[in-house]
């Protein structure tokens, strides 16, 4: 966004994107309106925010007065982030969930096996990532609750069946179906331009059945159809190709870093790192731990790359993956 807003604004904007209920959306929009600087350049954004707020409030009224008819699924957020698993029928979505988590989805060699979304927790080193398996999408089949699941997650996996001649077309159909519902499977997560209705979700193309001898032809055919540029990994759950590297590729999609904290004079707490968006400052870490801590924060000592061990840094110091931080309030 071209508007010169303070970092708090963008944090609330992030929160807004992941809001799972209308009430959460209303709360975030109200805060964004307060935080947004009021000047000529931000007029369009202000107007957009106001429209969104009005729409969300109206929808909230409707939701309160009418019982829900549409099925919806909300999975409490757990771990360092959430990633939805999308794709056409039989593309390996459930197999992926079964391979990387303890969840036990039905996996079968015929299409339309999965009827409802199912979450599972994937371990990557010392963090966990929530994966959500979903029913297939085709040009005629699309569960109404899917955009919400995809938009409230941090990233998506789009499965492409490397053993099927139909995969190029089916995969493009999935992308188009979501695009038709203002949900753009793309290279980064965030809003598209300044259009608050449209959300982009960072998506990894997961080519399954990648040991298939005709894979290269199918991928070439896919490329010729001008799909959006997505990062891509090749896996085969039967031969094991690429499977060991998949968790780290999924973790990287989240755009977060792990930060370990320590109390002065105590050892580092290695078991449960905080995960913060890449580029976060010492202050953001303090805020994550406790609002009061951020207010009373004086400086921090950091152990990490490019620093002396225990180097003192200010609130604005930008942290890096796997830094160890000791926060000092006096
Ligand atoms: N050889 C091989 N088989 C795979 C691979 N991935 C999935 N399969 C098989 O392909 C079939 C379909 O996999 P599923 O995971 O059920 O596919 P899905 O996308 O969940 O299908 P729906 O739920 O019907 O949309 C199953 O028999 C899987 O075991 C792979 O990488 N290699
Ligand atoms: Mg399935």
Image (cartoon, rainbow, N blue to C red):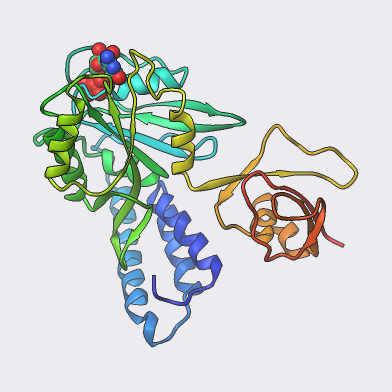
Residue 207 as seen in the image, left or right of residue 258: left
Q: Nearer the viewer, residue 249 or 255?
A: 249
Residue 138 in view (yes/no) = no
Percent coordinates x, y for residue 278 in the rendering: 55, 53
The C terminus, quarter of image? bottom right
Q: Would you identify the image quadrant in which residue 223 lies?
A: top left
The relative height of residue 291 versus residue 262 in the rendered view (above or below) is: below
Up the image or down, 56 lies above or below 175; here it is below
Give the position of the N terminus as an image quadrant: bottom left
Give percent across and percent down for residue 92: 28, 22
What number of labels is visible? 0
* Residue depicted at x 39% and y 80%: 42
Quadrant of residue 258 in the image? top right
Q: Residue furthest right?
A: 265
Q: Left of 297 or right of it: where is 158?
A: left
Residue lying at 49% horizontally and 27% vertically, measured from the top left: 122
In the picture provided, is 238 more to the left or to the right than 314?
A: left
Residue 221 picture location, percent across and down: 12, 37
- Residue 46 locus on image (x, y percent): 37, 76
Q: Is residue 152 visible?
A: yes
- Position of 285 with respect to 190 (left or right) is right
Task: Give the answer, above or below, for where 264 lies relative to 90.
Answer: below
């Amino acid at each position: 966004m071209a508007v010169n807003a303070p970092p708090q604004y963008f944090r609330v904007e992030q929160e807004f994107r992941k809001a799972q209920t209308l009430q959460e959306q209303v709360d975030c929009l109200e805060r964004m309106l307060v935080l947004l600087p009021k000047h000529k350049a931000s007029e369009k954004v202000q107007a957009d925010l106001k429209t969104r707020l009005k729409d969300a409030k109206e929808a909230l009224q409707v939701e309160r007065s009418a019982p829900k008819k549409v099925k919806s699924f909300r999975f409490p957020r757990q771990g360092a982030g959430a990633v939805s698993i999308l794709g056409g029928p039989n593309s390996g979505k459930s197999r992926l969930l079964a391979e990387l988590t303890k969840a036990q989805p039905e996996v079968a060699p015929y299409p339309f096996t999965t009827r409802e979304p199912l979450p599972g927790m994937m371990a990557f080193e010392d963090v966990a990532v929530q994966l959500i398996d979903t029913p297939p999408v085709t040009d005629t089949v699309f569960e109404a609750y899917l955009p919400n699941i995809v938009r409230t997650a941090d990233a998506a996996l789009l499965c492409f069946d490397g053993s099927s001649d139909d995969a190029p077309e089916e995969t493009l159909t999935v992308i188009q179906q979501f695009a038709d519902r203002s949900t753009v499977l793309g290279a980064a997560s965030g809003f598209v331009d300044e259009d608050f209705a449209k959300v982009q979700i960072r998506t990894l193309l997961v080519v399954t059945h990648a040991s298939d001898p005709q894979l290269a032809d199918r991928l070439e055919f896919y490329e010729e159809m001008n799909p959006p540029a997505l990062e891509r990994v090749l896996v085969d759950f039967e031969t094991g190709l690429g499977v060991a590297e998949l968790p780290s590729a999924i973790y990287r999609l989240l755009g977060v870093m792990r930060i370990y904290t320590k109390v002065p004079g105590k050892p580092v707490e290695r078991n449960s790192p905080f995960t913060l968006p890449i580029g976060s400052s010492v202050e953001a870490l303090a805020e994550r731990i406790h609002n009061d801590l951020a207010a009373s924060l004086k400086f921090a000592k950091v152990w990490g790359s490019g620093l002396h061990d225990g180097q003192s840094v200010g609130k604005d110091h930008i942290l890096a993956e796997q830094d160890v931080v000791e926060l000092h309030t006096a």
